[in-house]
Image: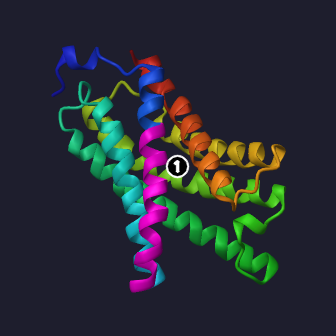
Amino acid sequence: MIRGDTMKRSVSTLYWTVLTTVGLGGGLVAGLIVGMPIGELVNAMIATAAVTCLVGGVLGCAQAFGLRTMLQRPFWWILGTIVGLGLGLALGVVIVEQLGILITGIRPNVARLDPISRAVSFIALGAVAGCLLGVAQWLVLRSQAPRIRGWVVTSTTGLALSFCASSVLLDLARVPIGSAFGAIAFVVTSSLLFGAITSQPFQHAA
């Protein structure tokens, strides 16, 4: 049973956006940094699982901090985010790679794709990762904050649009996504957009 006074509390758009930006952005950066040495020690599958779970863990911890007044057991949010985003990113990468191989015969490199193909790839990756993340987090919200509605749809469309829009903005600005500045700009922009989009269900439930 959830206490009534807890359910009356919500998360502001700015606060949630900042936490999500820090969490997703920090997680992606940490994943890139940790992933390189891990990839040299273990096979690609284990390295991918470790990196994607790390991203989910950092994001989950940051968001759970903002949800501590709404959730009785924030730990489950962290665990759900690790599982959901970990599986989602890994599965999304596999799907994009396999489709690329099927269509072109070679494994696609995001930095070398044309703008349209890159945007479509990020839509697919974001939709798969956002859907699995949304389902895992919704299971926590259903039991601890049932007034939050439309979370799976918001998470799915939010991550797909955020990844795609960030890619398009970089192309319009003529900033190579494969460069250090381009990678940082993509991470920050997509994290900021994802935070802003996923903050909306909290406002409608307040």
- The answer to whether residue 157 is visible is no
Q: Main secondary structure of the magenta part?
A: helix
Rendered residue at 61%/69% (across/down)? 95
| Magenta stretch in the rendered image | 21-42
Across and down, in percent, residue 149 comes to: 44, 29
Going by the image, does 73 lie left or right of 199?
left
Is 121 one of the magenta-colored residues? no
Q: Residue at x 68, y 59 (%)?
A: 179
Q: Where residue 141 sits: x, y (%)? A: 33, 36
The residue where tag 1 is placed is 130
- Residue 6 to residue 99: above or below: above
In the image, taking residue 148 as reference, residue 79 lies left or right, namely left
Identify the image quadrant of residue 73.
top left
Q: How many marks?
A: 1
- For badge 1, the amino acid type reads Gly
Mark 1: secondary structure: helix
- The answer to whether residue 41 is magenta is yes
Q: Quadrant of the N terminus?
A: top left
Q: Residue 47, percent across and down?
A: 42, 75
- 174 relative to 193, above or below: below
Write the residue at 46% across / 46% down: 24
For disc 1, the neighbor class at 10 Å (few under 14, some 14 to 19, many from 20) is many
Q: Residue at x 49, y 46 (%)?
A: 25
Residue 138 or residue 89, whichever sits in front: 89
In the shown orientation, is residue 12 left or right of residue 160?
A: left
Residue 65 appears in the rendering: yes
